Image (cartoon, rainbow, N blue to C red):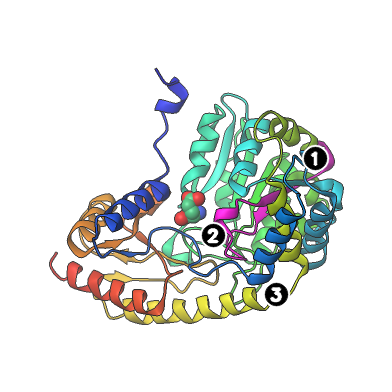
Amino acid sequence: MVSKRLTEIPASGTIAISNLVSQMKAEGIDIVSFSMGEPDFTTPANVIDACCDSLREGFTHYTPSTGIPELRKAVADQTRNVNGVPCQASNVLITPCKQAIFLTALAYIDPGDEVLLPDPCWVSYEACIRLAGGVPVYVPTFFEDGFVIDPAKIEAAITPRTKMLILNTPSNPTGCVIPSDILKQIAGICMEHGIKVLSDEIYESIVYEGRHTSIASFPGMFDNTIIVSGLSKSHAMTGWRLGWAVAPEDDIKAINKLQSHSISCAVSFVQKASVEAICGRQDAKDDMVKEFRRRRDLALDLISEIPQLECNVPNGAFYLVPRYSMDVPSAKLAETLLTDAHVAVTPGSAFGPGGEGFFRISYAASEEQIREGISRIKNCLSQF
Ligand code: GLU
């Protein structure tokens, strides 16, 4: 018998579709997959070389649970120099990004605590909150506003039980990059009410217009923030499972307690390779961002020719969330697209109640796949 806690949460919507796509592909079905949010590029060669070197040098044992000192320093230097967050190596815990979110939820949420999160948002925040015994409270964001969260709506959702706010900029699934002035207002609200912010910045380097701002860069706000980020998206390293939390030292100690009882430490040789990913040449990463931007524009052009769809121009990440005009639940639509048109997308409902009426396309796919997949979507929707 599995626990009650587990029966109350669904499996990850993104991972479930990705598993199904793998199975269908293995059966020989020609699927165009826009489902999984992962770069289709190979990890840069210098990072792979650094990993192989460290393996050959025998760097195959446990590391300190917080991570190797040179990687903690590299992450701190980058977070301070690029994002203006006043942090040092002692403020960094190396752990897979998803693990950082899960551990943060476990470390801070008591049963009944309320956690604010934008709606729509990434599929696993709600599950992490619920597994910790917390209560997710969605703050709606709207297509018409480019899905930028309204600070007044955050303030209106605060109750005496509110413990934490989860922010994700650039956002999965909307691609919204929250402007700096809005983040500043949110920082003020959170400091006033003593609400901790879990700031998921995993798409921080994939910004096309404007720039990424970390909420922890505003004066006094780092004391109130746990940043999570990593290399999965920026360096096409999804399979390496390497990320981090950056937070005040007491928070790092608390989260590290859970790390020491769970995975012990991040993979040793991956940590070595990650120093190279952060400190070595960045040309492959920069090229990827340029290519994502080209694909975004291509996908938007193709979608604009589909009468049933309308779409914002997102400024970051590699997702589009078109709104459709047909009267059909998004789960049903995604199922029809997969079974009839052999295109995998993620239904909007996987991202919260506000995702209904939308579906998510991950355009981290080749130009050929984008053209073919959107053409299949067009044909399929014309039959509704
Ligand atoms: N974050 C990616 C996505 O949304 C990968 C899968 C997952 O972690 O949910 O597709």
Nearer the observer, disc 1 or disc 2? 1
Classify residue 82 by image quadrant.
Answer: bottom right
Amino acid type, mark 1: Pro
The tag on residue 282 is 3
The tag on residue 64 is 1
Quadrant of the rendering where the N terminus is positioned: top left
Label 1 crowd bin: few (<14), some (14–19), many (20+), radius 10 Å: few
Picture layout, residue 344 above or below residue 227: below
C-alpha distance separating marks 1 and 3: 27 Å
Of 283 and 34, nearer the camera is 283
| Residue 334 seen in the current view | yes
Tell me which residue sits at (60%, 79%) in the image. 287
Q: Which residues are magenta?
A: 228-250
Of 187 and 111, nearer the camera is 111
Residue 116 in the image, given as x and y percentages of width and height: 56, 42
Tell me which residue sits at (76%, 38%) in the image. 65
Residue 370 in the image, given as x and y percentages of width and height: 36, 75
Q: Are marks 1 and 3 in contact (CB under 8 Å)?
A: no
Nearer the observer, disc 2 or disc 3? 3
Instruction: For ligand 1, tell me if the residue under mark 3 lies within 8 Å.
Output: no
Nearer the observer, disc 1 or disc 3? 1
Picture layout, residue 88 above or below residue 254: below
Residue 279 in the image, given as x and y percentages of width and height: 78, 67
Quadrant of the rendering where the C terminus is positioned: bottom left
The tag on residue 171 is 2
Of 151 and 117, nearer the camera is 117
